Amino acid sequence: MKFWKKMELHTKIILGLIFGALFGVIVGPKSVLIKPIGDIFLRLITMIVLPLVFSSLFVGTASLGDIKKLGRIGAKTLLFYLITTVVAITIGLIAVNNLKPGKYIKKETKEQLYKNYVNSGQINLKKVQKTSLIDTLVNIVPKNPVKSFVNSDMLQVIFLAIMFGIAATLLPEERGEPLLKFFNSVSDVSIKVVDIIMKFAPYGVFALLAAIIGKYGYKILVTLLTYSLTVVLGLFIHTFIILPFFVKFLSKVSIKEFLVKMRDVMILAFSTSSSNATLPVTMETVETKFKVPSYISSFVLPLGATINMNGTALYQGVAAVFIAQVYGIKLTLAGQLTIVLTATLAAVGTAGVPGVGIITLAMILRAINVPIEGIALILGVDRILDMLRTISNVLGDAAAAIVIAKSEKEI
């Protein structure tokens, strides 16, 4: 017991993942019985996201005291997210066009995969809604702030927090100060709650991974091995080479330092498959380990958890071309460019929760005239690949916070 107490948190979480995977393989489908433990952990950490985001973002905005500075940081943030998303999709397209995983799927394998997952595919396709970029922009402005909090609509909450923060800076100091102190306390308490919740992380990730392995098994990975490896290769290049290079080149933080200090965040992202659930830990990490000011982290990171989906965009590019290859559809350069554009726009509206990438993938398939039913072919491995692409998503957010803090001469 003393040995366990002395162990660092990231080591405990890694052990939780290893034993969770072994438990899932050995026990099999019955592993889902312990999933409620993982669900409770996920709910606990998701619970604190909204109060932390709103309070931190309000305090950060109100503390700026300069609207021009907020606009400058916002422009840098959006530009960084746009560039890294396009780079991620491009890496995915290069990998899938060269490895051609769709050509290795035999007809009988295709029919079996489709048979196993077609019902799930149809259920997901019913959720697809056509939304334009204009609609997405309009929906950022909440009609009912309370409803925005109830529905956990992050973009609307972010908009509300920024508006309140700007208004607080325009008030006389004695009028805005009480509200600033209140939300400062809320932010501090939220971070403390995160510290308490993370003590349960090893047990939560154990249950989550055991349930996933038990439910889906490892055999499905073998069936779609080439496709899975293509996605993993693209994610590896973007996550561990491209993003650290951006950080090294633009902020002078070494690649090793960046990856080592972000290990807890990456492990949690993998375990939960949720950028939103990982957000409190991401914020705490960049502020304490990289000395990023809270006014930058509280703006850049919540926004990133909502609109910056590097890993998801890369996966969608690979999946779209893979499905086209399975159906024998040759995509022209125009079709590939359509994937880049659609995946980039879809990333803006993608919520940072598990499994939502499948819904936005359907939008991309529609745009390039590939049968949407093909999604059923990849549903078996989606949950496992979702865990991997979430690492890329959160690492992209953290990289942006560090780079922007450096550009503002804050670190």
Image: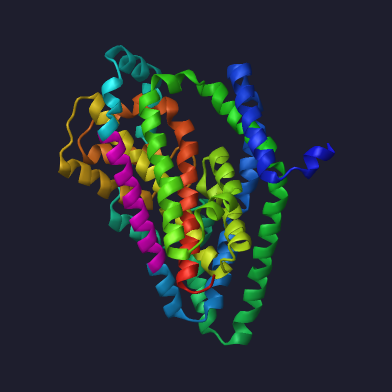
**Displayed quadrant of residue 71:** bottom left
**Horizontal and vertical percent position of residue 292:** 56, 66
* Left or right of 18 on screen, residue 340: left
- The quadrant of the rendering that contains the N terminus is top right
Q: Quadrant of residue 227?
A: top left
Q: Is residue 197 visible?
A: yes
Question: Does 389 sit above or below residue 186?
Answer: above
Q: Is residue 84 above or below residue 294?
A: above
Q: Residue 43 at what x, y percent from top left?
A: 62, 43
- Determine the residue located farthest toward the top in the rendered image: 108
Name the residue at 69% across, 39% down.
12
x and y percentages locating residue 130 in the rendered image:
29, 45
| Image color mode | rainbow
Residue 324, image x, y percentages: 24, 30
Q: Which residues are magenta?
A: 76-97
Q: Main secondary structure of the magenta part?
A: helix
Residue 140 falls inside the magenta stretch: no
Residue at left 48%, top 63%? 252
Q: Quadrant of the C terminus?
A: bottom right
